[in-house]
Each structure stands twice: as structure tokens, then as C-alpha cells.
Image (spheres, rainbow, N blue to C red):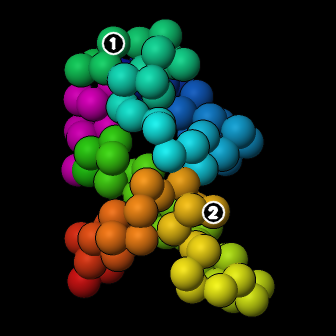
Amino acid sequence: MKTPYSSIALLEMEALFENRKIYLRSEITPSLIADLLKIKRRRLEGIVNNSFGLSIDNIVNMYRLQYARQLLISGEKYDSLWEKSGFSSRVDMERAFENIVV
């Protein structure tokens, strides 16, 4: 059930992603996002899962892939996309692509 509290948490999380681009930090985790939002990690995971049917990691990877796509369109070389998009490795980027797109 979506509550006003969960709506606020989602709006604040969106602001972290859209304005601060926290997904570009390779060390970002659901726990760090929850800490930034001053909410318990399990609570945030529940809100995200109930609202979107996705994990926080999936959402982070979706943002990263979208950013990588924008870089690629602007002429960035494929070999540097993973690092500039916040992934820990090229393999992680490709795995995220397979999990989300394929």
C-alpha cells in the first residue's frame, strides 16, 4: 500500500538520482541511499519494491544504463562507458544491460 510517507521517500529518492546523480558513484548501495534519505534500508527496499516491482539495485542500474546511453549517443567510446556511468567494471555494466534490457 502506498502511503504519504512512501510517496515522500520516493520523491526524495528521485531527487537524489535526478539532481545529485548519486548513481554515478560506483560505491553507492541501497544502505547508503537509505542513509541519505534517513530511512531504514529494509523500509526503503519495501517501498521501492511495492511501488515498482524492482530492487533499488535495479533502479540504480537503470539510471546508469540510461546515462551510458546518453554518453554513447554523444560520441563517448564504449570502453569508457562503464566507469563514467558508475559501474564497477565493464562486466558489471554488461550484466546490468542483460538483466534489464534482454
| Residue 84, disc | 2
The residue sitting at 57% across, 43% down in the picture is: 25
Amino acid type of disc 1?
Lys
| Classed neighbour count for the residue bearing mark 1: other residues with Cα under 10 Å, few (<14), some (14–19), many (≥20) | few
Q: Which residues are magenta?
A: 44-53
Mark 1 or mark 2, which is nearer to you?
A: 2
Q: Looking at the image, which is closer to me, 42 or 53?
A: 42
- Does the stretch in magenta take in 48? yes
Q: Position of residue 10 (x, y in %)?
A: 48, 33
Where does the N terminus fall, quadrant-wise? top left
The residue sitting at 36% across, 23% down in the picture is: 31
- In the structure shown, which secondary structural element does the residue marked by tag 2 occupy? helix
Question: Picture quarter containing residue 22?
Answer: top right
Q: Is residue 68 above or below residue 42?
A: below
| Residue 40, disc | 1
The residue sitting at 47% across, 36% down in the picture is: 28
Q: Position of residue 80 (x, y in %)?
A: 60, 74
Q: Looking at the image, which is closer to me, 46 or 56?
A: 56
Q: Is residue 38 left or right of residue 43?
A: right
Amino acid type of disc 2?
Lys
